[in-house]
Amino acid sequence: MRLPRSTIRRPARLALVTAMLAATCGLAGAATTWSPDRPTEVRIGSLVVGDNKYENVVVTVGSVLGFSATGPNRSYDSFNPSNGQLTIATLTVGSQSFYDVVITLGGLVSVGGGAPLAALVPNDPLFSRQWHLKNTGQSGAGGPAALAGEDLNVGKAWQLATGTGIQIAVIDDGLDIAHEDLRVVAGKSWDYRTNSYGDPSSSTSSHGTSCGGLAAAIGDNNLGVTGVAFNARLVGYNLLAATTGAFGADAVTKDLASNHIYTNSYGAADSNGLLAPADELWRDAIRTGITSGRGGKGAIYTWAAGNGAPEDRSDYDGQANFQGVLAIGAMNDQGQRSSYSEPGSNVLVTAYGGEFCSTQTTTTTDVSGAGGYNDGNKPQDITGSPNYTRCMNGTSAATPQAAGVAALLLETNPALTWRDVRAIFARTARKTDPNNTGWVTNGGGLHVNHEYGYGAIDALAAVRAATGWSLLPAQKTATQAATLGSALAIADDGPAATSSLTLQGSGIGKLEFVELAITSNHTNVGHLEITLTSPAGTRSTVSVVRDCKDTAGNAVSCGAALEGGFTFGIVRLMGEAADGNWTLSVRDGKTGETGSVSAWSIKAYGY
């Protein structure tokens, strides 16, 4: 059963070394004909160097202008500068593709009109409530004031990108397509109640409307709230109103030629501790999306990690742990994991969900009128603003924020593949809650934590990284199964059983993802702690000892859920080498039920 995943419950003379362009650039007198063999004057609309932004810049190049071979126009070769001074920039020519440009400077360059790059503060009246965008220490309905500075760091990023040209599909319970503060593409939303293009909204589709607003509510329009990618456009698919699970595969590939990002704030039932495998039809659909979407660069799928903690882990959800999606956890306004946010070896990064409406959650769009979360009958309702709510929470709220940041990256650098977006998120994430004992440095030199993934999304750092990003090489995969002479016995409430395998010749020097497939006849998977240790020594826990719960909250057996095999997803090993010894550890932590492991294997993804 698919369920929503909110619980609503800086003038200067500069020797430019590196730079980023934030607007359209041109070559004086050259129109669209590039001349890499002569001194050239480059006119730049807006140049960002570090935290300084310069408008109407004219740079006279003392030598030559050359194009690297990494841009879409490969007729220009890169060259080695004679004076050792480089500006590496990115040019946009009208609405054409990005070009990587190397400029050799003859010395210092005079740049006038500079000012510090300032954070954009939208004029939307409810922006001051949106602590996840700009945290000034706001107070909520209860609890302590927010920790100032604990936010997405998106204000300066908005000087560089706002999501223009990017389309986000909100797969949820619906989307208010007539909402005053949402830019919804006319006629392109899908209604699964009628299985046709139409209005996917209803008086109860608050969840999807709130998700849409967090991702892309229209910003700086003197109205309502601000979305992360406030110039992006939206479509809505009300999958949660569908009557058959087969529509799940349809939704994640619908209008694949038009949609850049699909944000998904739903999943298997939370808080029961049960394993929930994804069906093969859905997995095939995601594979289609990441190989065929965006002209072969791959659609981006952001996925809610889940709200079932402490009973649940995101590892158990076969959709959230799949290698083609970006699993997003949630934090509160103190920069700590939200109490409900599920940890997991599959969690990539975290964004903001807050806790509960009685303390502080996120402020976003609501269905128009009094039919949604803000019905005018609760003390925490936003008086006089029925089309907005301050009560959206959960990994449901965090996930569309990640989708919004992904939109900023794709506007900044449309050449990014979905794998590049995933890597940028991981490599630019901020280590939040630094005293948390779960932080480790993996073999790739990245900090990572089961509770936070690689940390809190940093929008500005991510956008800067995207500007000069070198695309990842083609992906390789390698599979290796363990050789078990006989079934690996698991002692009842005893020491861990271990087994090792060796992966060789994979050619993968940097991992991106690992799948762990395991088959066991143990009669209660809830008794099992399962950990995989990589050749670099990084431990990834995919199952912990727990009681499962029935719908009434009573403790029940988790069952022999590994008997037919289950695949866990691990993203916390990025940057490590794949070859070497991998060790599986399975420990039974409760008395009464036993079993053995009959097979296990890994599949490594990387380059």
Image (spheres, helix red, strand yellow):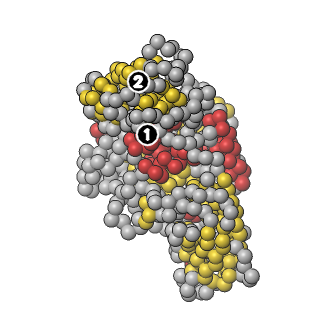
Determine if residue 462 is in view: yes
Q: Give the residue furthest to the right.
A: 485
Residue 385, position as x, y percentages in the image: 34, 34
User: Mark 1 or mark 2, which has the lower sequence index?
Assistant: 2
> The disc labelled 1 sits on which kind of residue?
Val
Asked which quadrant contains residue 257, the reply is: top right
Does residue 165 appear to the left or right of 217 in the view shown?
A: right
Which residue is found at the position 34% from the left and 29% from the top? 107
Q: Which mark is residue 463?
A: 1
Residue 13, position as x, y percentages in the image: 27, 29
Question: Regarding mark 1 in the picture, which secondary structure is present there?
Answer: helix
Q: Residues within 10 Å of mark 1 (few under 14, many from 20)?
A: many
> The disc labelled 2 sits on which kind of residue?
Val
Determine if residue 369 is in view: no
Question: Regarding mark 2 in the picture, which secondary structure is present there?
Answer: loop
Q: Which residue is mark 2?
A: 61
Q: CA distance from mark 1 to mark 2?
A: 27 Å
Q: Residues within 10 Å of mark 2 (few under 14, many from 20)?
A: some
Q: Give the residue furthest to the top.
A: 29
Q: Nearer the viewer, residue 604 or 186?
A: 604
